[in-house]
Amino acid sequence: MNEKIYYSAEDIAKMLGVSMGKSYKILREMNKELAGKGFLTIAGKIPVEYFREKWYGGAKEVSA
C-alpha cells in the first residue's frame, strides 16, 4: 500500500513544471474550493483524486 492519497506542493511543481510558489498557489485555491464544499483540508497537500479531477487532461505523475 504505497500509493499516495495526497500530493504535496513539490509533487505538483514537478508534474506541472511550475515553481514552488505557483504550486502553493494552486494548492491554496483547490483547498479553498474543498473547504467551501465543507471538506476538511490539509495546508500544502491536496487529495490525488480531487487534483486529477480538477486538472484538465490530468497531470502525469513524476516518479522519484
Image (cartoon, grey):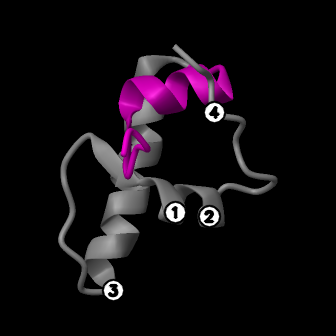
Mark found first going from the N terminus, 2 or 3: 3
Above or below, 45 relative to 51: above
- Residue 24 is inside the magenta segment: no
Asked whether the residues under the numbered discs 2 and 3 touch, taking CB atoms below 8 Å apart as contact, a structural biologist would say: no
Write down the residue under mark 2.
54
Q: Determine the secondary structure under disc 4.
A: loop
Write down the residue under mark 1.
49
Q: CA distance from mark 3 to mark 4?
A: 26 Å
- Residue 9 is inside the magenta segment: yes
Q: Residue at x 50, y 65 (%)?
A: 50
Q: Determine the secondary structure under disc 2.
A: helix
Label 1 environment density (alpha carbons within 10 Å; few <14, some 14–19, many ≥20): few
Q: CA distance from mark 4 to mark 2?
A: 15 Å
Residue sitting at the far right: 57
Asked whether the residues under the numbered discs 4 and 2 touch, taking CB atoms below 8 Å apart as contact, a structural biologist would say: no
Mark found first going from the N terminus, 1 or 2: 1
Residue range of the region highlighted in magenta in the rendering: 1-18
Label 4 environment density (alpha carbons within 10 Å; few <14, some 14–19, many ≥20): few
Write down the residue under mark 3.
37
Question: Mark 4 against mark 2, which lies toward the viewer?
Answer: 4
Could you tell me residue 46's position as x and y percent?
37, 52
Could you tell me residue 16's position as x and y percent?
65, 29
Q: Give the amino acid at mark 4.
A: Glu
Q: CA distance from mark 1 to mark 4?
A: 12 Å
Q: Give the amino acid at mark 3.
A: Lys
Above or below, 24 relative to 35: above
Q: Residue at x 19, y 53 (%)?
A: 42
Tell me, for residue 61, which label it has, or none. 4
Indicate left or right for 28 with 55 as reference. left
Q: Determine the secondary structure under disc 1.
A: helix
Mark found first going from the N terminus, 4 or 2: 2
